[in-house]
Image (cartoon, grey):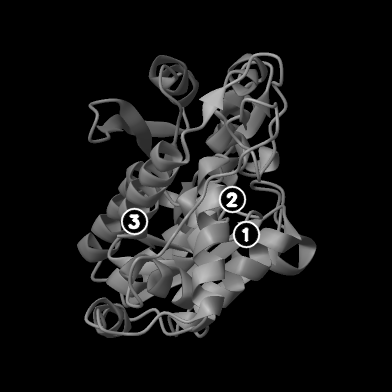
Amino acid sequence: TILQSVGRDTATALKKAGQRENPDYPERSVYNPRGRYDDDGKPQPPKLKFKRDTYFGPVLIGRAGASDDLSPEAEIELYTRFDQVVDEAARGAYRQAVLRAVAGEPIGYIRGLKEFYSLTFKVTPDVLIPRGETELLVDAAVDLARKRGGAGKLWDVCTGSGCVAVAAAHHAPGLTVLATDISPAALAVAAKNIRTHGLTERIRTAEADLLALPDELAGEAPFDAITANPPYVSDREYAELPAEVLAEPELALRAGATGLECIERIVRDAPDRLAEGGMLAMEIGAGQADAAYQLLTEGESFEDVRMLKDLAGIDRTVVARRRG
């Protein structure tokens, strides 16, 4: 994979360059991300040399994001071209990609692509990079649709790249989806992914702040299901996030002083947007399960509240059913 290629080449290049840390010159930049200097204090960027004309990493980087064909067949075709000669443009793109990776930029942004729920999505710094734990939202939506004969109306809130909306619609062909986000830039990315996966007839996008439906969409409610991956990072936690996470949109990560601000608003407004018996599935942060459970059970709007664990065993998604 490109992640492995970048990692191997970066480690080798840094080792061969003989660079060292100099505490007297702490400045860092994309061209000197580790703050490395020679004996004279001169910044030393990583050095990359290609020993042969065919090299898989540069081919991957050179092709990443160059085509709208995100099908499995296109990826397989790329992986089988080990004998493709790497031109200077691809080498240069690869060198820059390595520098960006060493500087802490997420691989998803460097490639411009991320796999999610067996599908490939375009990603940019305007959206969160899809994560494996968010697939639990798709599981919940698809399971509900199948129990109801494959049909239904889904509202995907804080859609970002559109990965949840697209994956749910792809795996539940009778599902129609409204995908909303407060960020116009994020919606542009989502719209592109919707077009790429051929789902423009079943997924509609609109700008909205959480569950505040614009007037022109007021008639869309009620929905059979609402999925949401809202901001849930507290101010204190945000200040402690690693650099690669801070490269992602603050608007999609940071919720406020407690981290529960957006979750509270969704729980408050969801009953008025859901049909009777409708499902709310919402991603939450580590350690927020008790608070989310209390929010959903302290009133009379929801029942059958349960938690879904991610692969690390953390309560990551809360699912509840509207009474009725």
* Residue sitting at x 36%, y 61%: 115
Q: Which amino acid type is marked by label 1?
A: Thr
* Residue sitting at x 70%, y 38%: 29
Where does the image place residue 47, in percent across and percent down from the top left? Answer: 51, 50
Where does the image place residue 279, in percent across and percent down from the top left? Answer: 39, 47
On-image quarter of the C terminus: top left
Left or right placement of residue 191 versus residue 297 in this view: right
Disc 3: which residue: 5
The tag earlier along the polypeptide, 3 or 2, is 3
Q: Nearer the viewer, residue 156 or 82?
A: 82
* Residue sitting at x 32%, y 48%: 8
The tag earlier along the polypeptide, 3 or 1, is 3
Around disc 3, counting alpha carbons within 10 Å, would you say few (fewer than 14), some (14 to 19), or many (20 or more)?
some
Left or right placement of residue 19 versus residue 114 in this view: right
The tag earlier along the polypeptide, 1 or 2, is 2
Q: Nearer the viewer, residue 195 or 317?
A: 195
Query: Mark 3 or 2, which is nearer the eye?
Result: 3
Disc 1: which residue: 180
Q: Which amino acid type is marked by label 3?
A: Ser
Q: Establish if 221 lies above or below 105.
A: below
Q: Nearer the viewer, residue 90 or 74?
A: 90
Q: Is residue 104 visible?
A: yes
Around disc 1, counting alpha carbons within 10 Å, would you say few (fewer than 14), some (14 to 19), or many (20 or more)?
many
Query: Mark 3 or 1, which is nearer the eye?
Result: 3
Q: Which amino acid type is marked by label 2?
A: Cys
> Circles 1 and 2: CB distance less than 8 Å?
yes
Where does the image place residue 14, in percent across and percent down from the top left? Answer: 45, 39
Dot 3 lies on which element?
Answer: helix
Distance from disc 3 to disc 2, alpha carbons, whole Å, reads 33 Å
Q: Could you say which disc has been placed on residue 216 in the image?
A: none
Disc 2: which residue: 158
Around disc 2, counting alpha carbons within 10 Å, would you say few (fewer than 14), some (14 to 19), or many (20 or more)?
many
